[in-house]
C-alpha cells in the first residue's frame, strides 16, 4: 500500500507537507519521501522500516522551503522520483501496483531508455511510470498513454513548475481528494490528513480524472471516466477510521459491518472485542447490535509497531504481530469472547499471535467474526497479498480437494456445502470455537455503494 499527499500554498508549504504526509503512515512501513519546489527541486527519501516517518524527516524539513510539494509513504519504491524531461523537470509519486512492470521495463530498455532507481527489489515502478509519461506529446497526453500501457493501477501526484497534477487511477481503485484552506490547496489519499491541518474537503477526484492544482485553485485537465472500481478493502481494513472515500466514512462502514455480523449470529458470549486497530470499529458495531458489552481484551502497544499486514517479509510481519498486541488476563480469563477481525488473509498471525494469546490467558470460548468474506485472490491493483497459495481459504480448498483447483465458484457461495467445508477447515486450523464470515452482499450494503462501483477482485476474482 501507498499514501500520497501534496500541497500548494501562497506561503511556505513544508510544515503542512510534513504533517500531511505523516498522516498516511498507516499505509506504508518501508519508505518515506518528500519533494519540495522552491528555487529548485529539493528531494529527500528515507528508510522508515525501523523508525517513524516524523523522526526521520524532522531535520530534513528544516532545510526545505517552497510553496508546493508532494510526499509519499510506501511499502515498496523509493519515492518521489525527479525526472528532467522535454516537459521540464518534475517530481512524481505514485500509489498502486503495476502488474506488467517487467514487461514494460524490457520494452523501455529496448527503446533506449535507462533507469537509475535500481535496488535489490528491482526496477522502481514509479520511475517506469515517469518514463512512460515522458513519451507523450504533453504531460497530460503522456499520462493518458501511460494508462494505455500499464496493467494494474496507478494514482499519481506530479509536481511541476505549473503546480501539482493530481491523477486518479483510470478505474478509481485508489482514491484522491482535494482540500482547501484559506487559498491553500492539498491533495491526499486520505481525508484524515485534512482535519487537524484545517483543510475542508473540496472535491473527490473521479476515476481517470486529471486536475492541475496551483495558486489559482484546481483546474480540470481531463474529465473522469464512467467506470469506477474503488477498492472495497479501504473501508474494511486499509483506510484510517477518520477517512472518507466517495463521501463515505470508514468508521461508519465498519460499525455497519459489525451490525450485519451480529444480525446473522446467535452466539452467546460475555463480551465482544476487536483485533486492534481496524477490527475495533467492526466490534463496536457488533456489540451495539447484539447488545453485548464491548471490552478490550487485547490492546495495541502503539509506539514503534505498525500494521503487521503491510511489511514485505513474513518474519517482520510475525515479529510485529507478536509484539504489538498485549493481552489483558483479567479481562480474558473465564469468558466467552466474540472477536471481530477485519479479515483473514493468511490466518497465521490470527492463529499464532491473537487466538493463542486468548487461550493462554484463560479464554473459555473464542468466536472469530471477520468483517469480509474469505479472500480468494491476491490483489492485482495494490501491494497486498503476494501469492494465491498464502491465502487461508486456498489452503483449505487444496486440503479438501487434494490439489489446487482453478474453478472455486462453489466455494464462493455461502450456502453451499463446499463453502461450509472450507470454513470448518479454517476454523480447525485457527483453533477457535466458531468461525463465521461476513457475506459479500452484507459487506457491500455496509459500504453503501453499488456493487458495480467497487473492486471486489480479492473475494470473487472479478
Image (cartoon, rainbow, N blue to C red):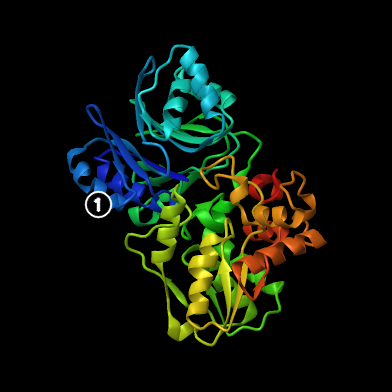
Nearest the viewer among 451 and 9 is 451
Whether residue 416 can be seen here: no
**As drawn, which residue projects farthest toward the bottom?**
334
Q: Residue 341 at x, y = what percent?
A: 56, 65
Does residue 338 lie above or below 391 as drawn?
below
Secondary structure category for the residue under label 1? helix
- Residue visible at 29% across and 46% down? 18
- Residue visible at 45% across and 58% down? 318
Q: Residue 56 at x, y = what percent?
A: 25, 48
Mark 1 is surrounded, within 10 Å at the Cα level, by few (under 14), some (14 to 19) or many (20 or more) other residues, namely few
Does residue 157 lie above or below 391 as drawn?
above
Residue underneath mark 1: 55
Does residue 237 lie above or below 106 as drawn?
below
- Residue visible at 58% across and 85% down? 270
Q: Residue 415 at x, y = what percent?
A: 81, 62
Q: Residue 241 at x, y = what percent?
A: 48, 60
Look at the image and tell me in which quarter the C terminus lies.
Answer: top right
Q: Is residue 202 left or right of residue 236?
A: left
Q: Quadrant of residue 425?
A: bottom right
Nearest the viewer among 320 and 41 is 320
Nearest the viewer among 30 and 225 is 30
- Residue visible at 56% across and 49% down? 246
Amino acid at each position: 500500500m501507498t499514501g500520497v499527499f501534496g500541497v500548494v500554498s501562497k506561503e511556505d508549504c513544508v510544515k503542512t507537507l510534513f504533517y500531511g504526509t505523516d498522516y498516511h503512515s498507516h499505509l506504508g512501513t518501508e519508505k518515506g519521501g518528500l519533494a519540495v519546489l522552491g528555487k529548485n527541486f529539493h528531494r529527500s527519501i528515507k528508510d522508515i522500516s525501523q523508525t517513524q516517518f516524523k523522526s526521520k524527516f524532522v531535520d530534513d524539513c528544516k532545510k526545505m522551503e517552497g510553496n508546493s510539494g508532494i510526499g509519499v509513504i510506501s511499502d515498496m519504491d523509493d519515492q518521489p522520483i525527479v525526472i528532467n524531461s522535454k516537459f521540464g523537470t518534475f517530481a512524481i509519486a505514485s500509489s498502486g501496483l503495476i502488474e506488467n512492470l517487467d514487461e514494460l521495463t524490457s520494452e523501455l530498455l529496448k527503446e533506449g531508455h535507462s533507469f537509475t532507481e535500481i535496488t535489490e527489489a528491482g526496477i522502481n515502478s514509479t520511475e517506469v511510470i515517469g518514463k512512460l509519461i515522458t513519451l507523450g506529446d504533453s504531460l497530460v497526453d503522456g499520462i493518458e498513454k501511460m494508462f494505455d500501457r500499464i496493467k494494474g493501477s496507478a494514482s499519481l501526484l506530479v509536481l511541476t513548475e505549473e503546480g501539482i497534477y493530481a491523477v486518479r487511477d483510470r478505474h478509481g481503485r485508489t482514491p484522491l481528494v482535494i482540500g482547501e484552506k484559506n487559498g491553500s490547496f492539498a491533495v491526499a489519499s486520505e481525508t484524515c490528513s485534512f482535519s487537524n491541518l484545517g483543510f475542508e474537503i473540496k472535491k473527490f477526484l473521479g476515476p481517470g480524472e486529471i486536475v492541475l492544482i496551483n495558486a489559482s485553485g484546481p483546474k480540470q485537465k481531463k474529465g473522469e471516466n464512467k467506470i469506477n472500481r474503488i477498492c472495497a478493502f479501504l473501508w474494511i481494513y486499509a483506510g484510517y477510521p477518520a477517512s472518507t472515500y466517495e463521501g463515505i466514512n470508514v468508521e461508519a462502514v465498519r460499525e455497519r459491518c459489525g451490525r450485519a455480523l451480529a444480525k446473522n449470529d446467535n452466539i452467546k458470549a460475555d463480551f465482544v472485542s476487536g483485533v486492534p486497530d481496524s477490527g475495533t470499529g467492526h466490534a463496536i458495531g457488533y456489540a451495539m447490535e447484539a447488545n453485548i458489552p464491548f471490552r478490550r481484551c487485547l490492546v495495541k502497544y502503539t509506539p514503534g509497531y505498525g500494521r503487521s499486514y503491510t511489511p514485505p517479509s513474513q518474519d517482520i510481519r510475525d515479529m510485529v504481530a507478536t509484539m504489538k498486541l498485549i493481552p489483558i488476563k483479567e479481562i480474558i480469563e473465564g469468558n466467552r469472547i466474540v472477536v471481530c477481525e477485519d479479515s483473514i488473509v493468511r490466518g497465521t498471525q490470527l492463529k499464532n499471535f491473537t487466538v493463542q494469546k486468548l487461550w493462554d490467558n484463560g479464554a473459555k470460548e473464542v468466536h472469530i467474526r471477520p468483517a469480509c468474506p474469505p479472500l480468494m485472490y491476491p490483489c492485482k491493483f495494490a501491494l497486498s497479498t503476494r501469492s494465491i497459495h498464502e491465502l487461508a481459504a486456498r489452503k483449505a480448498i487444496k486440503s479438501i480437494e487434494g490439489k489446487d483447483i482453478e474453478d472455486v465458484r462453489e466455494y464462493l457461495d455461502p450456502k453451499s456445502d463446499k463453502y461450509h467445508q472450507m470454513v470448518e477447515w479454517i476454523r480447525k486450523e485457527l483453533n477457535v470455537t466458531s468461525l463465521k464470515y461476513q457475506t459479500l452482499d452484507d459487506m457491500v450494503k455496509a459500504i453503501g455503494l453499488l456493487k458495480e462501483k467497487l473492486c471486489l477482485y480479492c473475494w470473487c476474482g472479478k
